[in-house]
Image: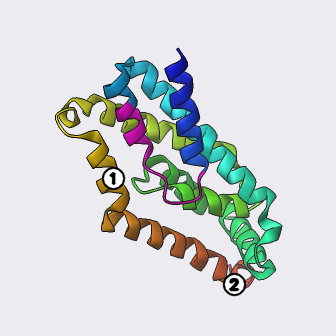
Amino acid sequence: MEIYFAAAAAIVAMNALPAFAPPTWMALVFFLLHYKLNPIALVILGVISATLGRAILTWYFRKFAHLVPSKFAKNMEFAGTYFTNHSTKRFAQFAIFLVSPISSAQLFEAVGMMKTINVKPLLAAFAAGRTFTYSTYVTGAAAIAATNFGDLVIHELKSPWAIAVQIVMISAFIALGSVDWKSRIRNS
């Protein structure tokens, strides 16, 4: 039972990090292969823990938004207003959190800065989407069992593609906060 708590703590911590954390599926596969855990329980634990970690990430970006440059923080607040004032944009943001195959850390960071956006529906969409993806990864873990898992983790962390995706997502987050959303709200 302690190993389930360790897995939950690791997954929450990984999902509360703003960038460069290993993907949750890796932790799930690691715990599945090394500790022979129940796959269904592990997926449920993974979804709950990842969602809690993203909620924490969002919370501390919302709580400490005053520490970033004020122009950036204001632009992000206006972006939140822009996205919540249009029903089609609200649906699109829900869909992004549901099906996003890329790292969602920067998406939750942006939502944390956009104080007008209700986080709960996005967390629900994230949990629903991750239920499918984590089930797929855990089910496919047998294929990875033949590889050296440590080498796989190190390779993924050092992968130029993984680093590039994180840099692109961080850049997109910064670009989002650099847009003059106040004028876009007035023009829409």
Front residue of this view, candidates 6 and 80:
6
Q: Residue at x 34, y 19 (%)?
A: 36
Q: Residues within 10 Å of mark 1 (few under 14, many from 20)?
A: few
User: Secondary structure beneath disc 1?
Assistant: helix
**Hey, which quadrant is residue 111 in on the image?**
bottom right
- Is residue 91 left or right of 100 when viewed as pictured? right
Closest to the observer, 84 or 128: 128
Q: Is residue 19 left or right of residue 162?
A: right
Nearer mark to the viewer, of 1 and 2: 1
- Position in image of residue 75 (x %, y %): 73, 77
Query: Residue 147 appears at what percent x and percent y?
Result: 19, 39
- Crowding at mark 2 (Cα within 10 Å: few <14, some 14-19, many 20+): some
Task: Give the vertical position of 93 relative to 44 (above or below).
Answer: below
Q: Residue at x 31, y 43 (%)?
A: 150
**Residue 23 located within the stretch drawn in magenta:** yes
Residue 180: assigned label: 2
In this view of the protein, can residue 165 be seen by the observer? yes
* Residue at the spot of label 1: 154
Q: Secondary structure at mark 2?
A: loop
Q: Residue at x 59, y 43 (%)?
A: 13
Give the amino acid at mark 2: Asp
The answer to whether 3 is drawn above or below residue 172 in the figure is above
Magenta residues, start to end: 17-30
